[in-house]
Amino acid sequence: MARDHFATLGLTPGDYAPVEIERQFHRLRGPLVATLTAPGRHAAARAELEALYVAYRALSRASTTTPTRSNLPIADDATHPSRVRAQAPEAELRELILASVEDGLLRHSRRQAIIEHARALGLGEFQAQLYIAQTLYGGADVLGPSQAAQPRRRQRTGPAVARVAAAGVLALAVFLALLRWSGV
């Protein structure tokens, strides 16, 4: 990601247990919460708390994921081309969105920060809003290949046709019964 979450939490890059990350988060959070009451420091403390929370969420999510073959380093050399590959802007934006969600909700200030980050990545505001919606509500891949290009499966129309036919036969029977009753 563009921000160094380890530096925000005061940790050196590495693999930490979730308990260690949470301990460091609470250690840094306490003094910042105390400075929220200072009028001259309120805005800066709030911004630092936001960054701290996003870093905590990002590292907590990263520590709970199990390493797969694709994200294991191939070589010990940090300059190896496969190790230095850049993260796709969409994946980076999704990680930032997931890290910014608090109890299932995304604050307006965090949404605006995500949109600004998307602009820095070369994505438009509309695309950023789509990624936010897709990530939060788990919809289909909105920005993926067009659905029109894929052949659609034919819907089963058998039961619907049978219902319409049954309703028609019933209506005809009622009509004939009314004709017989009226004596025409």
Image (cartoon, grey):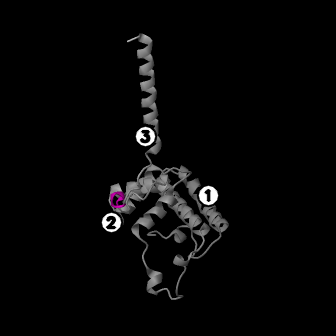
Residue nearest the viewer, comparing 101 with 183: 183
Helix, strand or loop under label 2: loop
Look at the image and give the residue range highlighted in magenta.
146-150
Residue 184 spot, x, y in % from top left:
37, 12
Residue positioned 53% across, 58% down in the render: 49
Give me the C-alpha separation between circle 3 and circle 1: 67 Å
Helix, strand or loop under label 3: helix
Give me the C-alpha separation between circle 2 and circle 1: 36 Å
Residue 169 spot, x, y in % from top left:
44, 30
Helix, strand or loop under label 1: helix
Residue nearest the viewer, comparing 94 with 144: 144
Give the residue number, with chain letter if any, for mark 3. 161
Q: Mark 3 or mark 2, which is nearer to you?
A: 3
Residue positioned 41% across, 70% down in the render: 88
Asked if marks 3 and 2 touch (Cβ < 8 Å), the reply is no
The label shown at residue 143 is none
Of the numbered discs 2 and 1, the one sitting upstream in the chain is: 1
Q: Circle 2: is it few (<14), some (14-19), or many (20+) Cα within 10 Å? A: few
Q: Is residue 24 left or right of residue 124?
A: right
Give the residue number, with chain letter if any, for mark 2. 122
* Magenta run includes residue 167: no
Of the numbered discs 3 and 2, the one sitting upstream in the chain is: 2
Q: What amino acid type is highlighted by mark number 3?
A: Val
Residue 40 appears in the rendering: no
* Magenta run includes residue 149: yes
Looking at the image, is 158 positioned above or below residue 132?
A: above
Q: What amino acid type is highlighted by mark number 1?
A: Gly
Predominant secondary structure in magenta? helix
Asked if marks 2 and 1 touch (Cβ < 8 Å), the reply is no
